[in-house]
Amino acid sequence: MPTTTPIEHVVIVVKENHGLDNYFGTFPGANGMAMAHAHNPPPNDPNHTHPAWLKRAKTASRVQYVESDIPKYWAWARAFTLCDSYFTDVAGPSSPNHLMLVCADSPIIENPHPAPLFDRPTLPAQLDKARLTWANYGGYVFDYLKYTQGKNKKAPTQFAVDAAAGKLPTVSWLYAPFGRSEHPVENVTKGMQWTAAQVAAVVKGGLWPKVAIFVTWDDWGGWYDHVNPPVVEKWTDGTQFRYGGRVPFRPELLKRARNREILQRMIQNLRWIYQRQRDFRMALRIQQLLLCITPDRPEEIRDRGMIHFRLALFAEAVADLEHYLLLAPQAPDAPQIQKRLKELKRLVPRMN
């Protein structure tokens, strides 16, 4: 990692099956929607398959949790960051989205039964290549991938032990044990308490000044969300593959000023690496994360437009570059962007 950052450890906490409106629909300032109060624990597991996602407007469960159900999550969102325009990669259930978190790709759109062994490039392989350490605390999807199968595998309970001892790897993927993942029909308050205990262990081990912790949820869970995700890729049957529904995402354990700037630079460096490798799908994913942190920064909107161009998503590229020029008409690169826009509009005749 760059020597200009104090961040030495990244922790990705993956909880299960809750959308943005379902958890933060009434959070002040968020793009949410108020609905009826959900039972805790939920009485059943809503259908969250791909076919169910396609019919979500009519069949998804329209209930939500409130601050008294998950007070620590709301406190973190107030104190640090809540991304309310963060979408899962796949419009479907857990396994394809878990694959996306580990290898930025998924050859499946449903949970596989039985699970095959996929030979795909992985983020852990990139970390090994860079001589950085990583660990899988309880994630099942690592055993779906040839490179990570059986490697650096630890129980979820080991994370708090390692964190409290100040001995975390560079990157940790952390998954809750049964009963604490928040997957219906589990109690969401108990799941939140488990997450808070993991953070407390990080603090106890003296790693707080050196760590960036991301908490997210793997899929939409069958709950209604009022924001429809953009279509950036279709499945083999022509239905929407990417993106899926909104889920809460919080790079929350960061000091308000300097550490957020540091995180921004780290993510920009990671995007640059994937652009150099011409992995523009992953670069776009990282760019969406940057826009969660700085949603109104014109340069980030411009950069997303250029990545859309590389992915031949010309209509999306035009929209981003036009927005950039609207926000920064006097920018030094405005003439070059205007020239690129003219070229793009020739590729998208309907937008002329």
Image (cartoon, helix red, strand yellow):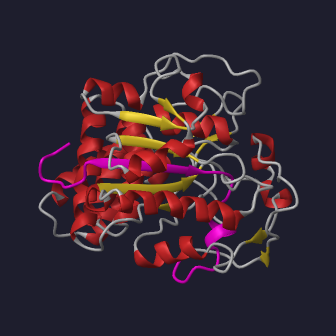
Image height of 171 relative to 331, above or below = above
- Is residue 341 in view from this perspective? no
The residues colored magenta run 1-30
Q: Residue at x 48, y 65 (%)?
A: 83
Left or right: where does residue 256 sit relative to residue 138? left
Percent of width and height locating residue 342: 30, 49
Residue in the foreground of this view, choosing between 17 and 150:
150
Give the position of the N terminus as an image quadrant.
top left
Residue 114 seen anywhere in this rendered image of the structure = yes
Q: Is residue 204 magenta?
A: no
Total numbered badges shown on the rendered structure? 0
Quarter of image, res 308: top left
Indicate the quadrant where residue 273 lies: top left
Q: Main secondary structure of the magenta part?
A: loop
Quadrant (top left, top right, bottom left, bottom right) of the C terminus: bottom left
Q: Which residue corresponds to the image point at 54% horizontal and 83% vertical from the top-left?
A: 28
Location of residue 186 in the rendering, given as x and y in whole percent from the top left corner: 76, 57
**Compared to 138, does 107 lie above or below?**
above
Quadrant in which residue 235 is drawn? top right
Q: Is residue 345 left or right of residue 302?
A: right
Image spot of residue 65 (x, y percent): 71, 73
Q: Residue at x 35, y 51 (%)?
A: 304
| Residue 194 in the image, given as x and y percentages of width and height | 59, 59
